[in-house]
Image: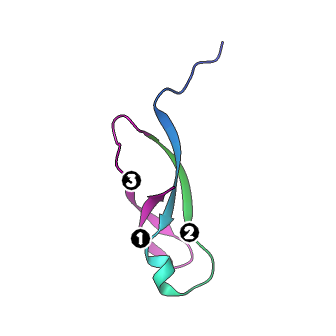
Amino acid sequence: MAKSKGNRIQVILECTEHKASGKAGTSRYITTKNKKNTPDRLQVKKFNPILKKMTVHKEIK
């Protein structure tokens, strides 16, 4: 019998600085979050391999 994940949902994080830089491509990460504990959009510092530095990644829909 499979157990359900409950309140955990899969979200996509996209780099905020990449669009302003004008370089081709996008930096995106997929992660999960508990929508009951964090109802707001996630904001996490992750590595952007195109810009080669740590940048803020925000949750997109």
The reply to whether dot 2 and dot 3 touch (C-beta < 8 Å) is: no
Disc 2 marks which residue? 27
Please name the residue that numbered disc 3 is placed on.
42
> Mark 2 belongs to which amino acid?
Ser
Question: Label 2 vs label 1: CA separation?
Answer: 10 Å
Neighbor class of circle 2 (other Cα within 10 Å; few <14, some 14-19, many 20+) is some
What span is colored magenta in the figure?
34-61
**Circle 1 is placed at which residue position?**
55
> As drawn, is 28 to the left or to the right of 2?
left
**Left of 40 or right of it: where is 53?**
right
In the depicted structure, whether residue 47 falls above or below residue 35: below
Image quadrant for the N terminus? top right
The residue located at (51%, 39%) in the rendering is 9
Residue 49 counted in the magenta span: yes
Q: Which of marks 2 and 3 is in front?
A: 3
Compared with 45, 17 (above or below) is below
Query: Which is more N-terminal, label 1 or label 3?
Result: 3
Q: Report the front residue among 35 and 29.
A: 35
Q: What amino acid does circle 3 point to? A: Leu
Estimate the x, y position of residue 5 in percent, counting from the top left: 53, 27
3D distance between C-alphas at marks 3 and 1: 14 Å
- Mark 1: secondary structure: strand
Disc number placed over residue 9 in the picture, else none? none
Confirm or deny contact between disc 2 and disc 1 (CB under 8 A): yes
Where does residue 57 sit, x and y in percent of width and height? 44, 64
Q: How many marks?
A: 3
- The mark nearer the N terminus, 2 or 3, is 2
